[in-house]
Image (cartoon, grey):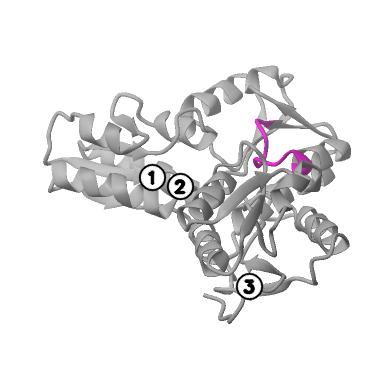
Amino acid sequence: MVETTEKRQRLLLATPRGFCAGVERAIEVVEIALDLYGPPVYVRKEIVHNPHVVDALRRKGARFVESEEEVPHGSVVIFSAHGVAPDVRESAAARDLTTIDATCPLVTKVHVEAIKYVKDGYSILLIGHAGHDEIIGTMGEAPDAIQLIENVQGARRVEVPDPNRVVCLTQTTLSVEDTRDVVSVLRERFPSILVRADICYATENRQQAVKAIASDVDLILVVGAANSSNSIRLMEVARAQGVTSYRIADVAEIDAGWLTGVRSIGVTSGASTPEVKVSEVLEYLNAIGFPASREIKVVDEDVTFTLPKELRAYRKG
């Protein structure tokens, strides 16, 4: 908690925030592929969940498609950071596509675990949000053995063939608190359950940073896309701390009415949000009278990931 004796006007900037190692890697993969193969390079789905990132890469020559079936035969296609199901890889191979896998290594870890436990005869309970690209990819590894659990109610209803052979996996971008509640119910129902909580380091760190500033601000703005799961979770974490919070894609989405009577504001951003979008928000707040931001850091991040094997021999510049 930030120590203070009064609620004076202030602007606090949560750290860590913004790009995580998986997002940085995914963006670099597209940029290197464009250099190496030349445009157009096709990307299946949004490479990360942020329209500003997608638009910037589109201007450089990336073409974003919903399905690998939209990619011309023999072309280059990149799989997004959220991962894909095996049938997507098979479809790409059938179309003679050159594939580059930008899946975040932490998401890949969940896929590997799913495959392992299915082979060992376990039922898999996957905590996550229906329709999210990461969930679609993970469930595709073993659709007959994986059941999606979205909330506590789902945890109370789920049934498995053998209660002694159950494993719990998680979507990487969930709220720590929400996951804990669901896992608690699952442990109660299935005492032998194996729990592999795979919430990523970046998600957890950004949530802890929000908690660190929550008691000292009247409002928290989370800069992130509407389809960014981790950005939405940051807003929810802030609200769970009793603080008014809004998610905004960029400065244009700030409603001046939110700021009425507000003397202290916290700002953070999701793991796929460019820092320039945070800077624009801070500049706006400075211009309307809030002082220069004070950074509140809860941890240093030094995580890096290697490039996909297809690109490791190539370095820009």
Give the CA separation, mark 2 to mark 3.
31 Å
Residue at 38% over, 45% down: 170
Quick check: can you spot residue 190?
no
Residue at 43% over, 43% down: 171
Which residue bears the numbered disc 1? Answer: 170
Could you tell me the amino acid type at mark 1? Thr
Which one is in front in this view, the residue at disc 2 or the one at disc 3? Answer: 3
Q: Is residue 159 left or right of residue 112?
A: left
Q: Is residue 11 left or right of residue 182?
A: right
Give the CA separation, mark 1 to mark 2.
8 Å
User: Looking at the image, is mark 2 or mark 3 earlier in the sequence?
Assistant: 3
Which residue bears the numbered disc 3? Answer: 7
Which one is in front in this view, the residue at disc 1 or the one at disc 3? Answer: 3
Which region is colored magenta? Answer: 44-53
Q: Are marks 1 and 2 in contact (CB under 8 Å)?
A: yes
Q: Position of residue 57 (x, y in %)?
A: 81, 41
Residue at 48% over, 59% down: 204
Could you tell me the amino acid type at mark 2? Leu
